[in-house]
Amino acid sequence: MHEVTPRARVSGQVLLRGEDIYAPGTDPVLVRQRVGMVFQKPNPFPTMSIFDNVAAGLRLNGFLVRRSALGDTVERSLRQAALWDEVKDKPNRPATELSGGQQQRLCIARALAIEPEVILMDEPCSALDPVATLKIEDLMRELAREYTIVIVTHNMQQAARVSDHTAVMMMAEDRAGEMIEFGPTREVFT
């Protein structure tokens, strides 16, 4: 896992491996290769198959050329996202045919395919039913063994269930986005 240093915006820095990702001269393409993103609402590419959705980042960044290597990476990513068993017989089906929870796991697989150092998740379960939410939460705990995951959630119970460390942000007119507390989850919640 890689350390992402939490900092209040006072310093204006967001550090990844000790480097400010907003510093002049930082290559945004390199940052995007090191940081995967999963959004609040599942966003599979609507004109692409399940396979092509996962492979999209790899193709755009020129990571792989051989079809067999691409297939291996897509399978690995779908397995990591706990979706392989549900889609292995239909990789060429449109991604939009998947349920909401499956689409969100597909988007997680797409983020995992580029082997990022950090995965950012913005309210990844807010549009999902309780069963799909449980699958995503289980998946986050599993992935946290290999990846640094930063999740934004308004669901305090979810934060307590899935996180090791918690940052509490202030949301007031004059203090929007100010970090008011950070620490081990157990300490923050007790």
Image: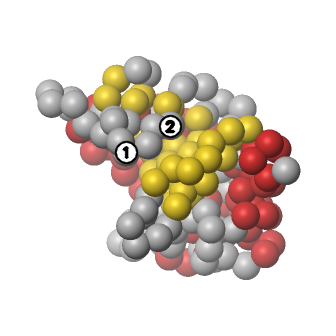
Q: Name which residue lies at 22% across and 31% down.
A: 23
What quarter of the picture does the N terminus occupy? Answer: top right
Q: Quadrant of residue 185?
A: top right
**Residue tagged 1:** 9
Kind of residue indicated by mark 1: Arg
Q: Quadrant of residue 161?
A: bottom right
Percent from the top left, x then y, of residue 93?
Answer: 52, 69
**Residue tagged 2:** 6
Q: Is residue 73 above or below residue 41?
A: above
Kind of residue indicated by mark 2: Pro
Q: Is residue 13 above or below residue 53?
A: above
Q: Quadrant of residue 149?
A: top right
- In screen coordinates, is 102 left or right of 189? left
Q: Secondary structure at mark 1?
A: loop
Label 2 neighbourhood size at 10 Å, few (<14), some (14-19), many (20+)?
few
In the image, 141 versus 74, the foreground residue is 141
In the image, 56 versus 40, the foreground residue is 40
Q: Secondary structure at mark 2?
A: loop
Percent from the top left, x then y, of residue 4?
Answer: 50, 32
